[in-house]
Image: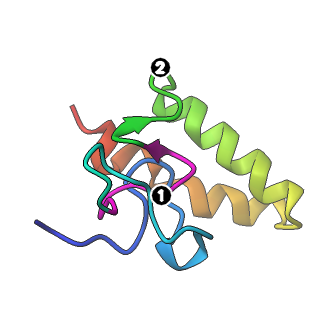
């Protein structure tokens, strides 16, 4: 299975995840999703849309001191991540 460098739900680099990644239902580390998006084999926000995720991530980045235009650049690709592909 492919190993991703960023969460395929929110786009956060795994290197920035305090837990390293999310956890699958069998207790193994997820190679697709971060700990903020995925716990015990389930999404933490199962009903969120890609646009809502983008808004949530932009808000979090701004709270952490990133300028507005940078938050737009960082979140532009969220709808193209694996979770949001239909």
Q: What stretch is highlighted in magenta?
A: 29-39
- Name the foreground residue: 70 vs 84: 84
Is residue 84 rendered to the left or right of residue 18? left
Pointer 2 residue? 47
Q: Where is residue 38 in the image (x, y as percent from the top left)?
A: 45, 45
At mark 2, the secondary structure is loop
Q: Within 10 angstroms of label 2, few (less than 14), some, or many (20 or more) residues?
A: few
Decide which of 31, 4 is in the foreground and name it.
Answer: 31
Q: Nearer the viewer, residue 66 or 38?
A: 38
Q: Residue at x 32, y 42 (%)?
A: 83
- The dominant secondary structure in magenta is loop
Q: Residue at x 39, y 53 (%)?
A: 23
Q: CA–CA distance between discs 2 and 1?
A: 17 Å
State the count of labels: 2
Name the residue beneath numbered marker 1. Answer: 34
| Residue 11 horizontal side relative to residue 18, left or right | left
Q: Which of 21 and 71 is in front in this view?
A: 21
Q: Residue at x 89, y 67 (%)?
A: 65
């Amino acid at each position: 299975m492919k190993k991703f460098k960023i969460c395929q739900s929110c786009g956060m680099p795994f290197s920035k995840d305090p837990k390293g990644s999310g956890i699958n239902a069998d207790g193994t580390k997820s190679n697709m999703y971060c700990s903020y998006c995925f716990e015990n084999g389930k999404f933490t926000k199962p009903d969120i849309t890609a646009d809502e995720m983008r808004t949530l991530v932009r808000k979090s980045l701004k709270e952490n001191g990133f300028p507005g235009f940078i938050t737009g650049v960082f979140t532009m690709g969220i709808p193209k991540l694996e979770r949001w592909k239909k």
